[in-house]
């Protein structure tokens, strides 16, 4: 059955080795920068030299970051900030931008940085099969309703749900390069023998485009990348 | 200008056989489409949550997969509308009217005006079901859309086919087959009532009132009566639908909402300086929706 192209970012799925605690690390989003400020739940985020985080692909941060342009630090899952219009702390699964933020109070972002975390994510228009397990892979974004200018996709993010439109870019950024931010370590719901009772459910057919895959961090701020196999 | 003697000039003299103009009203229809809720707030909001998806395969000694994606996905807003209408009538037009029982100064039909206005507001939800209203919010697409987003895919509750046996059956099967929750799990969704404009009633009668398959000489049974539970509530004609070809299937899932904030009320007073009688009606309500799974719609092109 054909999979559907409806990416919704990276969702933590399990850990590797030790049992995951699903810790969310508090980092900061710039409360004043008006350039590409939106971040959605499930977005990979990069840490800039300013200490703030941004959606991967904005502010010169790319899949293969150059020195000083920021490197993947984790996956964003929510934030809180002091809303000017609501006059109270607002909790949100996405950061909508600085327009409503009390800049003095800052923005607290919650990010999964666990180097052992595994994520389930949709692949691109090239199916990711068993042969691709072990390769490194980059990120791209489906067209959404957000307002960021991003080198990896057009207006990424869904402002209705607050969910990311990020997916693993199997089409153009998959291979052995150590700089790629993620690593393919499995296919959704596939047993090692290749069987999958859920193959008829969208996302579970690895013979078709847009299948869901399991990835882990490869090249991040906490962990240097290694060559894919 | 108030209703004055010149407006009722023939009611001032005896001899009229009768006074016509007020007719039996169409029975209420909106309440057969929308679920009534009472409201106590200016804005009612309904959140659509995502619960858990499918359980995942676990290998021997491997970790259990966690699904931490549960949580809010959409919020549907429903803001109430104020509806009002009044009229003024002069004292002379009251005193000199010889036919008060047929043209009652204190009752010129506010009830009927408000009732029919309500029907139009209700039908407007269906008439504009393919146009997204940002004030509603929700999942970011129109009530009837080919691409309602759920996690990882999209679902359609829309078609563009004219009403006939195969398209009605296809709709009933699509509701059962395709409707899923936000995590992608199938839900118990079944068509229960066909809503059509007057022009489609002959088609609906032929489809739903026959034991045998419509339009054939065979003795096949009429599958519409039983497929996916049939249509237990049959069909209803809505006189306020603006398209002569659009048709809708209501499902067993609650999601089309009529919220009553202030019940219909009337009031009157005599103006001190003019002696005019002022009569007005008021009510406050809204029609809206908070779940697209409550409907399947077709807008043939």
Image (cartoon, rainbow, N blue to C red):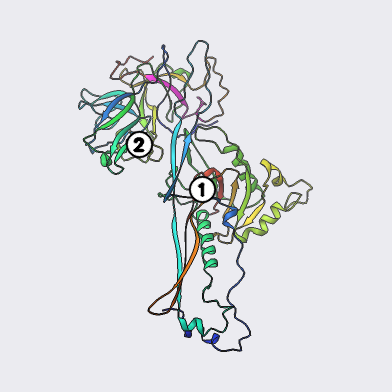
Q: Do we see residue B293 in this rendering? A: yes
Q: Reply above or below: B161 against A129.
A: below
**Can you say which quadrant of the picture contains the C terminus of chain A?**
top left
Where residue B141 sits in the image (x, y, percent)?
A: 45, 45
Q: What crowding class fits label 2: few (fewer than 14 Cα within 10 Å), some (14-19), or many (20 or more)?
A: many
Q: Reply above or below: B45 against A208.
A: below
Residue at (50%, 81%) from the top-left corner? B94
**Can you say which quadrant of the picture contains the N terminus of chain A?**
top right
**SS assignment at label 2:** loop
Numbered disc in front, either 1 or 2: 1
Residue A209 is one of the magenta-drawn residues:
yes
Label ID, residue A140? none
Label ID, residue A156? 2
Q: Chain of mark 2?
A: A
Residue in the foreground of this view, choosing between A111 and A201: A111
Residue in the foreground of this view, choosing between B71 and A150: B71
Where residue B234 sits in the image (x, y, percent)?
A: 67, 51
Q: Chain of mark 1?
A: B
Which region of the structure is painted magenta?
A202-216
Q: Which residue is mark 1?
A: B144
Q: What crowding class fits label 1: few (fewer than 14 Cα within 10 Å), some (14-19), or many (20 or more)?
A: many
Q: Reply above or below: A60 against A83.
A: above
Label tally: 2
Q: Do we see residue A183 in this rendering? A: no
Q: Is residue B61 left or right of residue A91?
A: right
To which quarter of the image does residue A113 belong? top left
Q: Main secondary structure of the magenta part?
A: loop
């Amino acid at each position: 059955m054909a999979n559907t192209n409806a990416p919704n970012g990276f969702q933590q799925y399990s850990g590797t080795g030790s049992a995951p605690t699903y810790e969310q690390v508090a980092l900061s989003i710039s409360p004043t920068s008006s350039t590409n400020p939106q971040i959605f739940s499930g977005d990979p985020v990069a840490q800039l030299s300013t200490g703030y985080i941004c959606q991967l692909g904005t502010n010169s941060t790319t899949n293969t970051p150059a020195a000083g342009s920021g490197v993947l630090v984790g996956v964003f899952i929510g934030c809180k900030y002091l809303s000017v219009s609501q006059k109270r702390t607002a909790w949100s699964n996405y950061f909508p931008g600085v327009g409503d933020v009390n800049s003095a109070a800052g923005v607290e972002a919650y990010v999964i940085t666990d180097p052992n975390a595994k994520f389930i994510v949709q692949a691109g228009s090239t199916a990711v099969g068993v042969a691709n397990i072990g390769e490194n892979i980059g990120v791209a974004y489906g067209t959404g309703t957000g307002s960021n200018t991003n080198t990896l996709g057009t207006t990424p993010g869904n402002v209705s749900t607050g969910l990311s439109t990020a997916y693993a870019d199997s089409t153009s950024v998959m291979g052995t390069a150590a700089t790629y931010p993620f690593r393919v370590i499995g296919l959704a719901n596939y047993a090692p023998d290749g069987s999958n009772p859920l193959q008829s459910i969208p996302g579970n057919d690895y013979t078709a485009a847009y299948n869901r895959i399991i990835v882990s961090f490869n090249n991040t701020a906490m962990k240097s990348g290694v060559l894919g196999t | 200008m108030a209703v004055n003697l010149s407006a009722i000039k023939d009611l001032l003299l005896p001899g009229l056989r009768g006074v016509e103009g007020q007719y039996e009203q169409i029975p209420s229809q909106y309440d057969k489409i929308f679920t009534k809720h009472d409201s106590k707030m200016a804005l009612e909001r309904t959140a659509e949550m995502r619960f858990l998806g499918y359980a995942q395969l676990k290998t021997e000694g491997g970790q259990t997969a966690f699904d931490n994606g549960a949580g809010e996905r959409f919020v549907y807003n429903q803001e109430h509308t104020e509806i009002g209408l009044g009229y003024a009538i002069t004292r002379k037009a009251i005193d000199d009217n010889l036919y008060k029982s047929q043209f009652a100064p204190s009752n010129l039909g506010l009830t009927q005006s408000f009732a029919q206005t309500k029907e139009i507001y209700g039908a407007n939800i269906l008439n504009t079901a393919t146009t997204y209203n940002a004030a509603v919010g929700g999942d970011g697409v129109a009530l009837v859309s080919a691409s309602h987003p759920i996690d990882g895919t999209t679902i359609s509750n829309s078609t563009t086919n004219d009403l006939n046996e195969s398209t009605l059956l296809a709709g009933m099967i699509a509701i059962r087959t395709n409707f899923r929750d936000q995590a992608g799990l199938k839900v118990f969704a079944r068509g229960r009532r066909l809503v059509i404009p007057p022009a489609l009633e002959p088609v609906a009668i032929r489809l739903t009132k026959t034991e045998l398959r419509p339009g054939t000489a065979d003795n096949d049974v009429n599958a519409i009566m039983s497929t996916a539970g049939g249509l237990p509530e049959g069909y209803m004609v809505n006189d306020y639908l603006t398209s002569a070809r659009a048709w809708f299937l209501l499902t067993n899932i609650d999601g089309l909402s009529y919220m009553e904030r202030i019940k219909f009320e009337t009031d009157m007073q005599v103006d001190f300086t003019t002696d005019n009688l002022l009569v007005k009606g008021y009510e406050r309500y809204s029609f809206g929706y908070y779940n697209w799974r409550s409907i399947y719609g077709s807008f043939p092109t």
